[in-house]
Amino acid sequence: MPNYYVNRNAQSNGDHEVHTTTGCSNPANPENRIALGNHLTCTTAVQKARQYYSQVNGCYYCTKACHTT
Ligand SMILES: [Zn+2]
């Protein structure tokens, strides 16, 4: 089950991206990560990230199933 985090820093479009802790080619700096815990799918990880930020998106590289354009 992947371990997820959300980036404290928003992208230029305002999205806070959700990433897995391993296997991302475009990760956030460790100090900018808010841990979201282990999730079976990215859907619940994104839901948890919404408790911190209203504008959340899955990372294009590691959480593509939850990435929207
Ligand atoms: Zn990522």
Image (cartoon, rainbow, N blue to C red):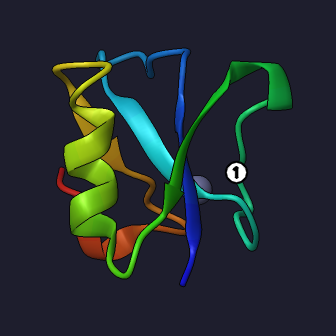
Report if the beta carbon of the residue with label 1 is closer than 8 angstroms to ligand 1.
Answer: yes
From the image, tell me which residue sits under label 1.
Answer: 26
Please tell me whether residue 10 is drawn above or below residue 33 in the rendered image: above
Vertically, is 44 above or below 52?
A: below
Residue at 34% x, 56% y is: 45
Relative to 60, 4 lies left or right: right
Left or right position of 23 against 10: right
Note whether 26 is above or below 35 in the view shown: below
User: Front-most of 46 and 39?
Assistant: 39
> Can you tell which quarter of the image residue 48 is in?
top left
Instruction: Give the number of marks.
Output: 1
Q: Where residue 69 sits in the image (x, y, percent)? A: 18, 50
Q: Position of residue 27 (x, y in %)?
A: 72, 47
Q: What residue type is labelled 1?
A: Asn
The residue most toward the front is: 37
Rendered residue at 71%/35% (across/down)? 28
Q: Residue at x 32, y 36 (%)?
A: 49
Quarter where residue 14 is shown: top left
Q: Is mark 1 on a helix, strand or loop?
A: loop
Quadrant position of ligand 1: bottom right
Please tell me how crowded label 1 is: few (under 14), some (14-19), or many (20+) other residues with Cα within 10 Å: few
Q: In which quarter of the image is the N terminus?
A: bottom right
Above or below, 55 against 41 in this view is above
The spot of residue 62 in percent (x, y) is 54, 69
